Image (cartoon, helix red, strand yellow):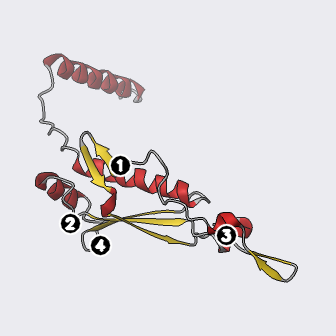
Amino acid sequence: MRAPHRRAGRLSVSLTALVRRPCEPEGVTALLPIRGNLAIPRSELRWRFSRSGGPGGQGVNTADSRVELLWDLAASDALPPPLKARAIDRLSGRLIDGVVSVVVTEERAQYRNRRIAEARLAMLVADAIAPPAPRRHATRPTKASNERRLASKRRTSEIKRDRRPPRD
């Protein structure tokens, strides 16, 4: 919405400012895809907007371009119970009362910051629900690698011994 401006002492508002535009553009689905067939319903997402700090010219004090995306992970039914438990465990440092918060202020346009926030939340949740990496078990070094290591140690020892002054 464009800000009203003064013209010849009167307040003037353009007609485009009075027309209500839909919040979401065409092509945006009702689900935020996470990974595979998992998705978060957009109805579970809460948005907060505020003025962003930093440079921005004349619009810095008028545009609410800072975006905060909130998702209540603890109350959500979007994830199966085992994945939800894993996500809560892995995101425990970021959760405040079971709510995940993503804040974006990079762009000057609120729309772009909203898209970035959604992408970050999706990436954050996808990383949190990823299966744990397979455990590595120690393997015994091969006989050849052990012999190479000992031969290298012998060579280094001989080099250092040759550097010493001769003993009388």
Q: In the figure, 79 relative to 159: above or below? A: below
Marks 1/2 in contact by CB < 8 Å: the verdict is no
> Looking at this rendering, what residue extends furthest in the bottom direction?
9
Q: Which residue is mark 2?
A: 74
- The amino acid type, in three-letter code, at marker 2 is Ala
Amino acid on which disc 4 is placed = Ile
**Left or right: where does residue 8 sit relative to residue 76?**
right
Categorize mark 4 by other alpha carbons within 10 Å: few (<14), some (14-19), many (20+).
few
- Left or right placement of residue 87 versus residue 107 in this view: left
How far apart, in angstroms, are the residues tagged by discs 1 and 2?
A: 18 Å
Q: Nearer the viewer, mark 4 or mark 3?
A: 3
Residue 101 location in percent, x, y? 37, 66
Does the rendering let one see residue 55? no
Residue at label 3?
60
Amino acid type, mark 1: Met
Amino acid at circle 3: Val
Say what secondary structure mark 4 lies in.
loop
Question: Could you tell me how far apart the alpha carbons at marks 1 and 3 are, in whole angstroms?
Answer: 29 Å
| Contact check, label 4 and label 3, Cβ < 8 Å | no
- The residue carrying mark 1 is 123
Q: Determine the image quadrant of residue 13.
A: bottom right
Quickly name the residue at label 4.
Answer: 96
Residue 48: percent from left, percent from top: 45, 70
Left or right of 131: which side holds 108? right
**For the residues marked 4 and 3, what is the alpha-carbon distance in whole angstroms?**
29 Å
Dot 4 or dot 3: first in sequence order is 3
Residue 42 vs residue 71, the one in the foreground: 42
- Crowding at dot 1, Cα within 10 Å, few <14 / some 14-19 / many 20+, comes out as some
Task: Give the residue at x 37% y 28%.
Answer: 160
